[in-house]
Amino acid sequence: MEKTGIQDLGGSPPLPPPPSHIPTGVDPERVEPPKLVMISRPDFGKSGRRIQLEANHFKVSVKSPDEIFYQYSVSISYEDKKAVESKGIGRNIIDKLYQTYSSELAGKRFAYDGEKALYTVGPLPRNKQEFTVVLEESIARREGSSGEPSKRSRQSFHSKSYIVEINYATKIPLRSVLLALNGDETDKVQDVLRVLDIILRQQAANRGCLLVRQSFFHDDSRALDDVGGGISRCFGLHSSFRPTHGGLSLNIDVSTTMILTPGPVLEFLKVNQGTSDARALDWVKAKRMLKNMRIKAAHTNKEFKIIGLSDKPCNELYFLMKGKYGDGTHGQEQPEEITVYEYFRRHRNLQLETSAYLPCLDVGKPRRPNYLPLELCGLVSLQRYTKALSSMQRVALVEKSRVKPQERKKILTDSMGKYLYDEDPLLSACGISIEKQLMKFDGRVLEAPKLKVGGDEDCIPQNGRWNFNRKRLMKPMKIDYWAVVNFSARDISQLLQGLINCGRNKGVIERPNTLIEEKPQYRRASALVRVEKMFDQIMSKFDRPPPYPFILCVLPERKNSAIYGPWKRKCLVEWGIPTQCVSPGNVNDQYLTNVLLKINSKLGGTNSLLALEVVSRVPIIRDSPTMIFGMDVSHGSPGQSDVPSIAAVVGSHSWPLISRYRAAVRTQSRKAEMIESLFKPLPNGKDDDGIMRELLREFYKTTSCRKPSQIVVFRDGVSESQFSQVLNIEIDQIIKTYQFLGEPNIPKFTVVVAQKNHHTKLFQAVGDHVNVPPGTVVDTEIVHPRNYDFYMCAQAGKIGTSRPAHYHVLIDEIGFSADDMQNLVHSLSYVYQRSTTAISIVAPVYYAHLAATQAGKLIKSEESSDTSSGHGSHTSAANVPVPELPRLHDNVAGSMFFC
């Protein structure tokens, strides 16, 4: 049978036969497809009521726009020409260079990026210069291995020379940023912004701050909040210069990083391992935790880096110390074998109260150990902690990171007055001044869309929220036969009775047919064993696979239960049974309603629709078959080098509805941000195993065999530097999918990037000291001077300071007006079927993020299963193969059961 188009979704496209010959004298012409480029802003939105706003942007004035930054490449090496790698040493050398050779540098102040670039205002005297910089380092001549000078050691200063080469690289005119503010495209605007940011970073470095990308953290105990396990949240500030519609601005925001709580090492270990007794410490775990941490010895005030722990306790750890001991005949030095404990007691007059029976810290080199007793060592401040946090630490971090709008405003305005950024000599040389108050401007508040629930009843959201009290669901999927399994060992009768009563009112569930309690003897077993034994109990009641269309699972823990992943894998991969996991604290009507909303959506039901969907009047969408995609890539947690990235795409179906979605998920190379499997032709040349084919097929089946002529893509998780890749890699893959299917007409595309990971916050300028109202949209003043972007805060922020979503419209072939686009985005924040509140980002993106996260848990549970079976493998991060995602059972494949 001939294969044509989406309805077949197989075969290669029909191609015209090649010409029999090419005429002589005619060269074949290669036609390159045009590259997709970002569009400029077509217009501004007008709908909605006006509201006076402020943002954490501070207006920047430039009085000397003709100044030019000169960039020089910097090479720092030792006298033997070996390169210096340490950024800390590099900054010290550059500081010394300026002090020593100020006249040779014509007194020019400069900004150093800590690596290989140096910037000045105006040129240096010569384009190429070489300097010798001498640093004096205080060192101790050690005769022993105790980390201490012996009796005959002496303090001295050792001079080390460095060679610094400075070569002219390029000019960066300050005026280019002013041209960009007028909407012109210039090559150097990002370079100017980078130089300005480096100047602020150098300021912070000179104040002794910890630098983390564009954030800096002061050494101030008042900025620390303990989150448990010896880890603290450190409060700091993020800064970046931004070109905006209202002019150049400095974006300042509260920032957070995790650090090791400074203080005694021994106390850190006890807190980290949850014990008050040093004798109960796991020293293997302690050695792994302490490696590479920096400590300061209390008796010398010197810093060291930990390389390990001693194998023996302090009072059994011997070393040879040279000196005039014994009879000292003829002034000869006789070595003495002495323990570290005795050395400090006899020769340093220090009584070690807790260290005698504990290991020592090794702060030397691999072949020359240098031991210090634990109680003399303290962790130095501002040491970043980059490992994954525990669930309890994450909860504590969230609680302590909540900052109310007025409090955040005060922190930011106080910092502007305290740190006086524009008094930097380089900024002053450019005539740059920064206002000390937040930028003020007008925003708009869009009207919330009307919803429809069961019985064609209207539901009007209030302040971004609605409820289902005395309301039925739009399309309930009634379950007459279902089961409950209980891993919690708690009495769940109240939960079940409430769920049954609520479910009857909503038209979803009746009383469960079976309640299976976990047997007590398995409660201390591993999660995998507990899940297997529970399914053995289920299967014991039937001669065939359980005929339940749904199972409710009550977990023992509320957060991060180890049972969750294996249970989901067993249900969704092996048996194809939809399941909902719960572990309630307080059972109330809202909680029960939310559980039922999730259950109904997983079973293919619909909880609510936009009123405009019901009557097929969604602007632009109604005019032509339109498909909406949400796309996201999820990466493993820090420290998980063997975990693949997971790409998730959800696609709408059942046009003209925009509330129904199907998910498709694939694994891909770790940390790869561009989705690799949108189009994936198989070696046979006839089939495509890509994501887009799967989702296009679902659209075709649910829209009476229609094919989308318009596609709206919402892409999450990419930075501005990756926008071009989204257009010319990912959208190109979608187009290739169409071409592979033999479709002659390529749909029109509108591509929107949704960002939540940014540092712009909105505040009400007058009146209430609360968050901006839901539906607040901004497309002036703080947006890009040329590109098509806007901020929207669709959600009602009850805790902390609301963060708006930042939407960038990359291309718009469909032709939305600014109002139509903003109203579509706003409406898509109200179609998330698992909630009775407007969400902070469009539902397709939220679904994609959720699907990727859930798929990651399936992979984790599968790896645990392989390891427990003895099939786990260990390979280096450099060549880890990408594991395939476990294939869902046909009963649930591709649906929103993932979520």
Image (cartoon, rainbow, N blue to C red):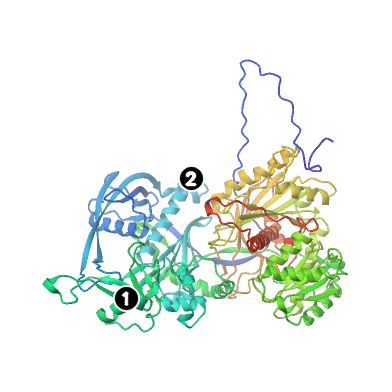
Identify whether 182 is placed above or below 746: below
Say which of 284 and 428 sits in front.
284
- Give the left or right position of residue 562, taking residue 81 as reference: right
Up-down: is 546 above or below 469? above
Label 1 packing within 10 angstroms: few (<14), some (14-19), many (20+):
many
State the residue position of label 2.
186
| Amino acid type of the residue that numbered disc 2 sits on in the rendered structure | Thr
Dot 1 corresponds to which residue? 340
Q: Position of residue 561 (x, y in %)?
A: 66, 71
Left or right position of 671 against 498: left
Task: Report, in whole angstroms, how far the alpha carbon at label 1 lies from the one at label 2.
Answer: 65 Å
Residue at (40, 51) in percent of width and height:
65
Between 734 and 349, the one nearer to me in the picture: 349
Would residue 601 appear left or right of 772 to someone viewing this image?
right
Q: Residue at x 80, y 76 (%)?
A: 499
Q: Is residue 776 visible?
A: no
Residue 573 position in % (x across, y down):
74, 59
* Residue 860: mark: none
Residue 698 position, x and y percent, is 79, 51
Q: Residue at x 30, y 57 (%)?
A: 93
Mark found first going from the N terminus, 1 or 2: 2
The x and y percentages for residue 49 are 66, 65
In the rendered image, which quarter contains the N terminus?
top right
Res 498 quadrant in image: bottom right
